[in-house]
């Protein structure tokens, strides 16, 4: 296996629908995390601060929305009027409906169920590391298609170096295999690959902070 397109859930013996069923389901109607003043400085809420600092426009789409953990934070700290969400997991989507104007179960490997130029902004948090390599470019093109020209795309992406080609799914002690089976991260890329991939679809790609922890143990030195 020397082609990243071969790095799939199937290769690791994972069925995505079963694997993610309820896995990342939080509570419905999560609070505005930044309503508490100290949270505006707490590192635990850096994702929330990143999103509200960059999301703009009236209508936005949350890719891989989970249970809409940042829904009320976005409403309370931006001018966004409508929030849409799509996710593979029905359990998460039902909870997201409490906070979002629209939420639907959807396979991100398919064509997004929205018209061209429909959203002012498309965002995600901790999703692209779960997208198989063979589908990443398709999803980026779909995000570009549904985003208005002059709009923005804001994503918190898991970033690191994992030697997937060293994985042995039949070895119960394989650290890469065990990591994938725990987290579902079949599509981790480093910051250079991320910028190259996104730059092939979007202009003015900016990476604010690339991190390797806790993925550093899997780096090839």
Image (cartoon, grey):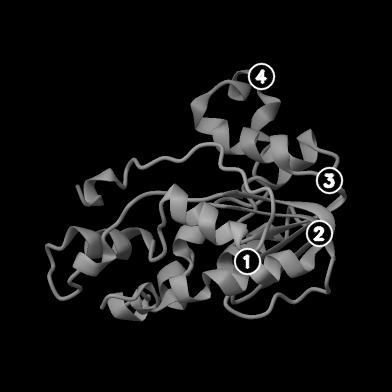
Q: Examine the rendering and report whether any part of residue 66 can be seen.
A: no
Residue at which label 2 appears:
101
Q: CA distance from mark 4 to mark 1?
A: 35 Å
Q: Are marks 2 and 1 in contact (CB under 8 Å)?
A: no
Q: Position of residue 208 (x, y in %)?
A: 56, 37
The tag earlier along the polypeptide, 3 or 1, is: 3
Residue at which label 1 appears:
140
Q: Nearer the viewer, residue 177 or 85?
A: 177
Q: Position of residue 160 (x, y in %)?
A: 37, 49
Q: Nearer the viewer, residue 147 or 84?
A: 147
Q: Are marks 4 and 3 in contact (CB under 8 Å)?
A: no
Q: Nearer the viewer, residue 74 or 154?
A: 154
The tag earlier along the polypeptide, 4 or 1, is: 4
Q: CA distance from mark 2 to mark 1?
A: 23 Å
Residue found at x 24% / y 68%: 165
Residue at which label 3 appears:
80
SS at mark 1 in the image: helix
**In the image, is residue 88 above or below residue 208?**
below
Q: CA distance from mark 3 to mark 1?
A: 22 Å
| Side (left or right) of 126 relative to 11 | right
The tag earlier along the polypeptide, 2 or 1, is: 2
**In the image, is residue 5 above or below residue 190?**
below
The label shown at residue 208 is none
Circle 2 packing at 10 Å, graded few (<14), some (14-19), many (20+), is few
Residue at which label 4 appears:
37
The tag earlier along the polypeptide, 4 or 2, is: 4
SS at mark 3 in the image: loop
Q: Are marks 4 and 2 in contact (CB under 8 Å)?
A: no
The tag earlier along the polypeptide, 4 or 3, is: 4
């Amino acid at each position: 296996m020397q082609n990243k397109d071969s790095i799939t859930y199937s290769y690791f013996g994972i069925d995505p629908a079963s694997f993610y069923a309820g896995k990342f389901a939080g509570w419905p109607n999560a609070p505005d995390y930044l309503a508490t003043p100290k949270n505006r400085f707490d590192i635990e809420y850096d994702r929330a601060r990143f999103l509200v600092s960059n999301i703009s426009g009236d209508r936005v789409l949350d890719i891989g929305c989970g249970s809409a953990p940042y829904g009320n934070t976005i409403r309370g700290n931006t001018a966004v009027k409508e929030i849409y969400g799509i996710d593979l997991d029905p359990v998460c989507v039902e909870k997201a409906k409490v906070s979002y104007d629209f939420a639907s179960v959807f396979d991100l490997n398919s064509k997004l169920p929205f018209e061209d130029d429909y959203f002012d902004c498309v965002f995600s948090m901790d999703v692209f590391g779960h997208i198989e390599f063979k589908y990443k470019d398709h999803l980026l093109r779909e995000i570009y298609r549904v985003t208005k020209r002059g709009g923005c795309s804001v994503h918190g992406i898991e970033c690191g170096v994992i030697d997937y080609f060293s994985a042995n799914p039949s070895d119960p002690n394989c650290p890469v295999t065990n990591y994938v089976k725990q987290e579902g991260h079949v599509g981790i890329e480093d910051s250079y690959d991320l910028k190259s991939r996104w730059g092939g679809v979007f202009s003015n790609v900016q990476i604010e902070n690339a991190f390797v922890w806790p993925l550093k143990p899997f780096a090839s030195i």
